[in-house]
Amino acid sequence: MFVLVLAGTAVRGDLVLTNYTAARPLKVMAVGDSITDDCSINGAWRLYLQPLLQTNGYAFTNVGRWVSTATGPFTETRHEGICGAVIGFPGMFGYHGYPTASNYALGTVADALTNTTPDLFLIDLGVNDMGYGRDPWFTATNELSALLDLMFARAPAAHIVVGKPTTISHASIGSPPYYTYSTNMPAFGAAIQSLVNLRHAQGQNVFVADLFSAVNGATMLQSDGTHPNPAGLIAMAGEWASRIAALTVRTDRVVTPFIAAGSTWKYSDQGLDLGTNWAQPSYDDSGWAEGVARLGYNTPGIATTISAGPVSTNKYITTYFRLTFVVPAGVHYTNLNLRINRADAVGVWLNGGEITRMNLPTGAISALTLASTVQTGDAPSTYFPTNLPIPYLPAGVNVLAVELHKFAPNFPWLSFDLELFGQGDYAPPVPPLTASLNGASVGLAWPAANGTGFVLLAGTNLAQTSAWSPVAGPYSLAGGSYEYTAPVNPTLPAEYYTLIYAGSSAPGSRVVQGPPSNAPEVPPSLSEK
């Protein structure tokens, strides 16, 4: 027996690029402190963000009351950064005509929104708040939350990207120096993530940019340990641009956020060696614990404390995590971008196959395999990126599984979280797939006129399309159709087929040659022969 799986449609949403033109540009307001203002370097990160947005098709203009010096191609000079700014009352440093006590964003942004309504806010605030020793959770959940309320009250349709601020671990400014309160910054970042996730779940267009991870405190800051140098500003611009891309709908390519930082994971923290079966989609994790990331212990910003074991000097080496995510139909995904918080090391599995590892040795690993190096300084709170080409990504439910390894059993901390984005483009409409029985064989066919770039995917379990495999052929071209013939064995389980788009220009992915490089379609209905 065999079954044809019909295709569904793609999921889209958020900031629609085609809504903005030169006549009606996207209005962007950069809100921040001296890292956004010109107090350190003219134009700051805005200098480098402008060409990134322009070359990626954004018709935009920057808005705000303050104006940087235009230099060369840097022309979008308006902004709402104010040196020394904090989020809530009282201010700590006067600037741009604001007395010291009045230089706080809840007051200054209200003034800035009197005569303009931005479409997109980029917020980089908190370095001064944390450097002055303010409480990270109160600052996020009360003052930053109130700032979001203010922005939505004045610009209800706006999108807001909130930055996790850059490190203050090296900051020598202030009295006492900002580095005195350096552990407040990762806690503040975690509080921001929690706030954004809550607001997003409520339907608000609020997102996170992880500036803390983007800017390396050892190499990307000026001598004051606070303000980014040009390399740091370039890294900030890249992070803003990637987050803007993730919330933008465009016609030529897709960036889909699959897993947000701070998501809820299943986990096993009992010190067991689970082999490799635990990473399979069919594995029963119903008995595992569940908690919000970051997960771990003894490091700032942990949301869920997991077990280290009964002996403090001989902690469990490996902890296991699992999470499902849904891939939309009609999208041709070619890459996965992962940002992984991993103190100290991880192996990552997708639908039962290992796709990457960080800070682990090569070869076979077990529950007793130690991380190659220890994560110290800002590293336990940093999210490390990796970009992976993928042969195909099944539509529907997928399973991501992660094993987290310590550097040594007596080391005091552990931390894990993960973000996952899919990158690709929209697949063309799926051509009709027909089937016919001919004795002990089944013939499958689809029109050649609109079928170039499609290949077959086959499997025996509709509930686990992630385990389906590409059908390598041979395919033939006859009578205006691509055709494939397969034997039918009535003693074996039913086999299901779907067409997936692999892209006619992808190496090895032409219909007449072999394996696909994208996602199969979600089956909204079934047709059985």
Image: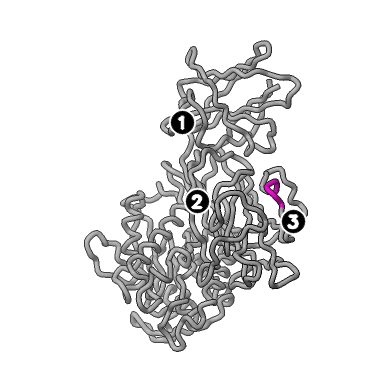
**Image coordinates for residue 332, horizontal then vertical, percent:** 50, 38
Q: What residue is pinned by disc 1? A: 508
Q: State how far apart marks 3 and 1 are (Cα).
A: 40 Å
Q: Is residue 259 visible?
A: yes
User: Which amino acid, mark 3?
Assistant: Trp
Lower sequence index among marks 1 and 2: 2
Q: Going 44% across and 43% down the picture, which residue do you hit?
A: 253
Please rate how many residues cluster around mark 1, counting C-alpha atoms within 10 Å: few if below 14, some from 14 to 19, many from 20: some
Q: Going 62% across and 41% down the picture, which residue do you hit?
A: 396
Is 495 on the left or on the right of 57, as rendered? Answer: right
Q: Nearer the viewer, residue 463 or 353?
A: 353
Q: Going 62% across and 63% down the picture, which residue do you hit?
A: 406
Q: What residue is pinned by disc 3? A: 288
Residue numbers of the magenta segment: 274-278
Q: Is residue 134 above or below residue 486?
A: below
The quadrant where residue 520 appears: top right
Asked if marks 3 and 2 touch (Cβ < 8 Å), the reply is: no
Q: State how far apart marks 1 and 2 are (Cα).
A: 23 Å
Q: What residue is pinned by disc 2? A: 337
SS assignment for the magenta stretch, majority: loop
Is 370 on the left or on the right of 114, as rendered? Answer: right
Asked if marks 1 and 2 touch (Cβ < 8 Å), the reply is: no
Lower sequence index among marks 3 and 2: 3
Dot 3 lies on which element?
loop
Q: Going 58% across and 75% down the picture, which residue do you hit?
A: 137
Dot 2 lies on which element?
strand
Quadrant location, the C terminus: top right
Number of marks? 3
Is 102 on the left or on the right of 322, as rendered? Answer: left
User: Which amino acid, mark 1?
Assistant: Gly
**Image coordinates for residue 374, horizontal then vertical, percent:** 55, 66
